Amino acid sequence: MSYSVTNFSELESFPVGKRGLIWHPIRSRLGIRPFGMNSYTSAEVGGEIVEDHSEETYGHEEVYIVVSGHATFTLDGEEVDAPVGTIVHLPDPSVRRSAVAVEPETRVLAVGGKPGEAYLPSAWELFFRASSLPPDEALRLIEASEGYNMADAAGYQYNLACYRALAGKPEEAVKAFRQAYELDPERVSGYAADDRDLDSIRDEISAITGQAESAGTSA
C-alpha cells in the first residue's frame, strides 16, 4: 500500500509525567522515517501539553502546531499565546520550551529532526511507551532498542536501571545506574532523589553517589 490514513481519534494514548501530559504516537503508527511526528494533549486545563525541555541533546529543529483548543507556550522564559492555528518554529535546539493547555480538548502536533542527518527516533519514545506496560514487558521493550537515537546515553541507562529494578533485577539495575551516574552525575542524582522506581536499590545508589562525592572532595 502506497499511503496511510489515520485520525487523531484513532491514535494510542500514553499518560506520561506528573502534570497531565498525554502522548499520542504518530511516527511509529504510520512508520514515518525521515522525521519525528507526534501529538500531545493534556488531561486537564492548565496541564502540561509540551514538556519543559530543550533539544540540545538531540540537536532537533522543531515545529509545534496548535491544531485544536488553546495553549500557552513558554520559550526561554517568554510566554507566547497560542490559540488554535498557531505555528511555533524552533530552529535553535537550545531554546527552553514548554506549553500548557488553556482550554479543554487542546491538542498540539509536534514535528522535528536534526538538519543534515538521517533521522533516528529518540529513545524517549521507548520510555513513554514502556511507562504503561508491566515491568517485565517494559524492560523487554527498552532492551530491544536497536534503531533508536541514543544521544542521551545517561537518560537511557537511568531508565534502564528503573525498569530493571521494577522487574526484580537489582544487580543489573545497579550496573545501569552506575553507568548513568558516571555519564551525568548531577542530573542522575536529581532524578534518583525521589524516584520510587529505584527504592529496591536505594542503598546501592547511596553508595555509588556517596563514594563519587567523597572521591571528588578528596581530589
Image (spheres, rainbow, N blue to C red):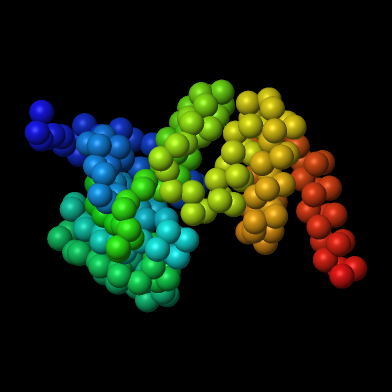
Report whether residue 24 is seen: yes
**Exactly how many numbered labels are in the figure?**
0
Q: Is residue 157 above or below residue 173?
A: below
Q: Does residue 12 lie above or below 217 as drawn?
A: above
- Residue 219: horizontal and vertical position, in percent? 87, 70
Q: Does residue 128 show up?
A: no
Quick check: 34 left or right of 15?
Answer: left
Q: Is residue 25 left or right of residue 208?
A: left
Tell me where residue 187 sits by quadrant. bottom right
- Residue that sits furthest to the right in the current view: 218
Q: Position of residue 45 (x, y in %)?
A: 34, 52
Picture coordinates of residue 122 (x, y %)?
Answer: 41, 48
> Against 197, is 61 above or below?
below
Q: Which residue is at 68% across, 25% downward?
A: 168
Question: Which residue is at 45% across, 65% downward?
Answer: 56
Q: Which residue is drawn at the image coordinates 47% and 36% (left, top)?
A: 145
For this view, does 50 lie left or right of residue 57?
left
User: Based on the displayed image, in which of its 4 quarters is residue 1 positioned?
Assistant: top left
| Residue 67 locus on image (x, y percent) | 18, 53
Q: Residue furthest left?
A: 2
Which residue is drawn at the image coordinates 25% and 66% (left, top)? 88
